[in-house]
Amino acid sequence: MSKVKSPSEKKHLSLEKDRRNIYGESPTSSRKNIRLGKQRGHMEQRRVVSEALRSLKGSSEQLDSDTVESQVKSLAIGRKRSAFKKVPDAPLAVALERKKSFRNQTNRRIHKTLTKN
């Protein structure tokens, strides 16, 4: 049984805990694009590392394995840092406030155009 008893408390907790996607895409495309973004990042990271290893020329005796390894790791870490990151969902209260402000801006624009005529 819920410890929260009053309806106003329930509403406040709901606005805090419930989350909404405010990125600006439809939910279906967000679900697909999150996976694709992660996949693209992993593919890019693998590509950069393999290019670095392919570009090494010379016999294995001439190449210093520690230097090569450190170069490859630094490239991989750089790509990982710039990879796709999902924008976290916002609390419902923030999403509703944002929606309300957009609605007010639209109403103001419509009102201005109607009063000019």
Image (spheres, helix red, strand yellow):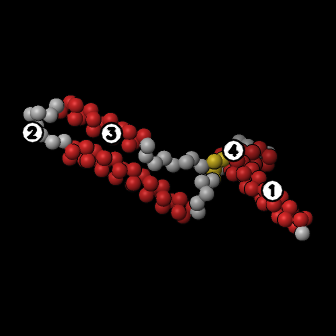
Asked where in the image residue 61 lies, by quadrant, the reply is top left
Between the residue at mark 4 and the residue at mark 2, the CA separation in whole angstroms equals 61 Å
* Residue 91, label in figure: none
> Is mark 1 in CB contact (under 8 Å) with mark 4?
no
Q: Nearer the viewer, residue 14 or 105?
A: 105
Q: Nearer the viewer, mark 1 or mark 4?
A: 1
Q: Position of residue 54 (x, y in %)?
A: 20, 47
Residue 14 visible somewhere in the drawing: no
Residue 95 visible somewhere in the drawing: yes
Q: Nearer the viewer, residue 7 or 88?
A: 88
Q: Nearer the viewer, mark 4 or mark 3?
A: 3
Residue underneath mark 2? 59
Between the residue at mark 1 and the residue at mark 4, the CA separation in whole angstroms equals 23 Å
The amino acid at mark 1 is: Asn
Residue underneath mark 3? 75
The amino acid at mark 2 is: Ser
Q: Nearer the viewer, mark 4 or mark 2?
A: 2
Between the residue at mark 2 and the residue at mark 3, the CA separation in whole angstroms equals 22 Å
Question: Residue 88 vs residue 42: left or right?
Answer: right
Q: Position of residue 71 (x, y in %)?
A: 27, 35
Q: Position of residue 67 (x, y in %)?
A: 22, 31
Residue underneath mark 4? 16
* Residue 104, label in figure: 1
Between the residue at mark 3 and the residue at mark 1, the CA separation in whole angstroms equals 47 Å
